[in-house]
Image (tube, rainbow, N blue to C red):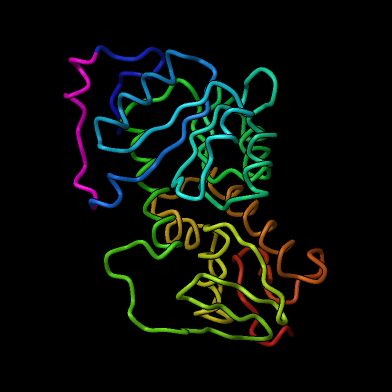
Amino acid sequence: MFCEERLQKPAAKGTIGTIHRGGGRKQMQNSKILIIEDDADIREGVRILLESENYQVTEADNGSRGLELLTEDTDLVILDIMMPGMSGLRTCEEIRKRSNVPVLFLTAKSQESDKLIGLMAGGDDYLPKPFSYAELLGRVKALLRRYQVYRGKTEKQEEETDKYLELSGIRINEEFNEVYVNGEEKELSNIEYQMLLLMMKHPRKIFSAQNLYESIWNEPYFYTCNSTVMVHIRKLRVKIEKDPQKPEYIKTEWGKGYKFDAYGA
């Protein structure tokens, strides 16, 4: 499914041109990506790959420096988990205090529990080392595509103003991607926002984990993706429910999936 070559050291510049380039939108190709990785070889290899796709790349070799380089114009952060000093997990937690920018974790750990820890820290996706160029580029493009929709950067941006969706005390302003619960604004990540919006547009419809994953991540579903969906459901409940242990809005239908209960029944 992906190329066999694995990214451990940067390829020679003459071979980068052989990588397949997708025909993404112009604004996607101009996206600004911040790489935070202490391994200079991997950092250089990723930078060469992304610049060959016309992305604007900024580099940092540690978490503290990465936080200094993070701006409101950053569209994606590629973050190594295991770094000296401030770890990638801690760095991600600090990023989440100031931005909803998508975070793609790179890590030598591949256990499911490690992936869940990364997602709970605020990560949006997780790529074990070693990884192929094609796999990295696919994850990057998918995260950027979702984030551009979230921030209203797509070319087909709707011209409607003040477009609201409101059910059971939750109000979503679709133009500005704002969410209010009983009048209080809630800060959601782009994935949490899309998950809530999808379920509110179809109240009481049961979405399986596969339905949610393929609709929001826009990728094929594998059994391991179920835990990814569960983590984001849990994080969403923490932000919008009075008691996440006894949810009124996002209900679990055991053995089936999840639904938005429009009436809090």
In the image, residue 51 lies in the stretch drawn in magenta: no
Q: Give the magenta-colored segment's residue range.
A: 13-25
Residue 93 in the figure: left or right of residue 161:
right
Q: Which of the 4 image quarters holds residue 155?
A: bottom left
Q: Residue at x 43, y 18 (%)?
A: 42
In the image, residue 18 lies in the stretch drawn in magenta: yes
Residue 242 in the figure: left or right of residue 250:
right
Q: Position of residue 191 (x, y in %)?
A: 53, 57
Q: Which of the 4 image quarters holds residue 20?
A: top left
Q: Position of residue 114 (x, y in %)?
A: 65, 32
Q: Position of residue 132 (x, y in %)?
A: 35, 25
Q: Quadrant of the N terminus?
A: top left
Q: Residue at x 24, y 49 (%)?
A: 24
Above or below for 121 versus 127 = below
Q: Residue at x 33, y 76 (%)?
A: 158
Q: Quadrant of the C terminus?
A: bottom right
- Front-lying residue, 184 or 124: 184
Residue 151 in the figure: left or right of residue 166:
left
Q: Which of the 4 image quarters holds residue 62?
A: top right
Above or below for 156 versus 41 = below
Q: Position of residue 164 (x, y in %)?
A: 51, 84
Q: Residue at x 64, y 29 (%)?
A: 64
- Front-lying residue, 173 or 169: 173
Above or below for 147 versus 202 = above
- Front-lying residue, 58 or 112: 58
Q: State the predominant SS element of the stretch in magenta.
A: loop
